[in-house]
Image (cartoon, rainbow, N blue to C red):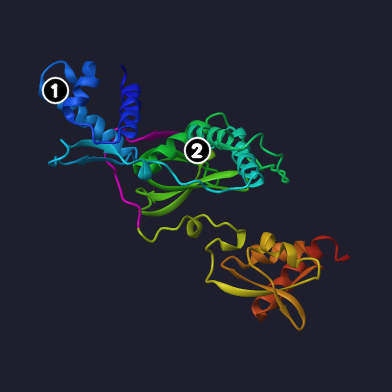
Amino acid sequence: MDRTERLLDLVALLLAEKRPVSWQRLRTLFKADYGEGSVEACERKFERDKAELLELGIPLTFVPRTDDDEGGYRVDPDAYYLPEPGLSAEELAVLYAAGATALSSGAFPGSQDLAHALRKVAFFADGPLAPPKVRLEPGVAVDTSALPARLDALWAAISARKSVTLEYFSPRSGEVTHRKVDPYGLALRRGVWALAGHCHLRGGLRTFFVHRMRWLEVNPARPKSPDFEVPADFRLDDVIPVWPWHARFHAPIDVDVSLSADLPPVARALFGADPVATPAGPHVTVRATDLDALVSTVLSLSPGAKVVNPPEAVARARAVARTVLDAHGGQGA
């Protein structure tokens, strides 16, 4: 029996048994694995299997002997099985559609885990999944055959907290540098995958576009032992911003943007913030560390959106608008 089959059979047995299973009984039931050869060798093999199950998150525990029971090993079903999520058929359909879209992109970290999760969603659905009332078309800015393998390698390194070495191309300098990086997290933004982590070459937190990696290797030494700890204050959104104006170029500034009557329902999708009603009409307050990025977004929505406060943001919006106007020969709409 190979190891994977043995572990699956061991978990199935411990889940099915009402009482703890003793070591002697395990040696009998798994005679070819734990019952033949020296006792010491069989015990070492079982200890390795226990460690593997615990690392996988299986709640394997040992119950000491009592007057009524000889004791042994068990897996608590209540701790093993996840509670029913209670999602409606339509919610399951949307969840399945989102996962299937990510999987069909061909470049998604943990793709095997995602595929397994989708099979579970489909299996537990009560009948065929209803077509979701959504359409998903993720943008893909880069196309490289190496991207799926790199994402899977980085996903594994992040999960195991293993350092990676890579060769990284910089289009600005045209050079390729050799880096050692402690990977903290991955983010997909506008079709581009980026890695955030501690760069040993630069001595600090950096981001790397995965498609610019020319070569990548996960540290093979001591695969079960982590190489680093992720800082307690690390937040992926702080390093790889969700919105363009969250790039950390300047000190944060709260910008007040007025909206036309038709924009409040989509304000959160446009700015990541909810609008408020004011005597002058609906407004939204957006915190930005890259004012030009926010101004560009607001101007693209003109005349439906307008920067109204603070004065420095209003001045910057006018300057950018004037630059655009001049670039088109001074002819405005």
Q: Which sits in the foreground, 322 or 9?
A: 9
Instruction: Name the residue rendered at 57%, 56% in the picture.
Output: 242
**Would residue 73 be visible to someone looking at this image?**
yes
Foreground: disc 1 or disc 2:
1
> Residue flagged by tag 2: what amino acid is it?
Pro
Mark 2, residue position: 109
Image position, residue 287 (x, y; %):
59, 70
At label 1, counting other C-alpha atoms closer than 10 Å, the crowd grade (few under 14, some 14-19, many 20 or more) is some
Q: Quadrant of residue 14?
A: top left
Image quarter (top left, top right, bottom left or bottom right) of the N terminus: top left
Query: Helix, strand, or loop for circle 1?
Result: helix
**Would residue 163 be visible to someone looking at this image?**
no
**The residue positioned farthest toward the bottom in the image shown:** 279
- Which residues are the magenta region? 215-231
> Which disc number belongs to residue 158?
none
- Left or right, 2 with respect to 190, comes to left
Image quarter (top left, top right, bottom left or bottom right) of the C terminus: bottom right
At label 2, counting other C-alpha atoms closer than 10 Å, the crowd grade (few under 14, some 14-19, many 20 or more) is many
Q: Is residue 206 above or below residue 321?
A: above
Mark 1, residue position: 41
User: For the image shown, how many numbered marks are present on the structure?
Assistant: 2
Q: Quadrant of residue 18?
A: top left
